[in-house]
Amino acid sequence: MPRVGLTPDGVVTHALRLIDDQGLDALTLAAVAARAGVATPSLYKHVPGGLAELRRLIAVRVTEELAERLAESAVGRSGDEAVEAVLRGYHAYALDHPWRYHALPQAPQPDEELTRAATRLVEVLVAVLRGYGLQGSEAIHAARTLRSAAHGFAALSITGAFQFSEDPAVTQDRLIRVLTSGLRAWPKD
């Protein structure tokens, strides 16, 4: 019988808190079970596929969280202001949750839930790009460009790659200006 109050979603929440506290390498069923206050075999009642399924559910949740953060960042904004807000929201998510960010899949997975979450993430970017009159294939190319820049800056930031004394916030400002200038000049379909 599953423990009262523990659900698959609750197991993911316990797993994410573990990851936040100890890093992605600390993720084991035993560690999650200890946080949840259950025996390790009890987790299989909530996550029958074990650690592999738990990792999948974490990837879905993290993708959903990032998509939600970007959508919230863009609300009420358009054009350059929306792009800036989305890029800063992306970076802030990575800084707020560096270990969760490492659990974010960077390539498509053959998984319906994950595909739905990733599609939502891309839809937010495409919606922001409508402010530049971009649609169809050009919107997809531009969304890929934004995501590449956002991911690159975030990944370098959370791994400590920016070692020179120049302020990374200034670098981010420059990156945003380069991207918004490029989007204003982007070819239309």
Image (spheres, grey):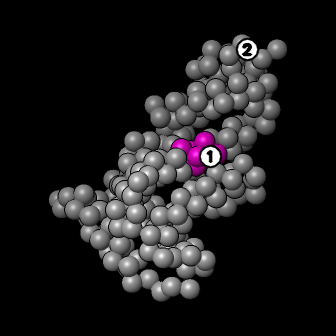
Does 65 lie within the magenta span?
yes
**Label 1 secondary element:** helix
Indicate the amino acid at tag 2: Arg
Indicate the amino acid at tag 1: Ala
Q: Relative to 143, is 184 above or below?
A: below
Q: Position of residue 109 (x, y in %)?
A: 71, 57
Residue drawn at 68 percent across, 16 percent down: 5
Residue assigned mark 1: 59
Seen as rendered, the residue at the extreme front is 76
Q: Relative to 23, is 155 above or below?
A: below
Is residue 160 rendered to the left or right of residue 47?
left
**Label 2 secondary element:** loop
| Most frequent secondary structure within the magenta stretch | helix
**Cα distance between the residues tagged 1 and 2:** 24 Å
Residue drawn at 59 percent across, 35 percent down: 27
Residue drawn at 54 percent across, 51 percent down: 67
Residue assigned mark 2: 3
30 or 60: nearer the viewer: 60
**Magenta residues, start to end:** 59-66
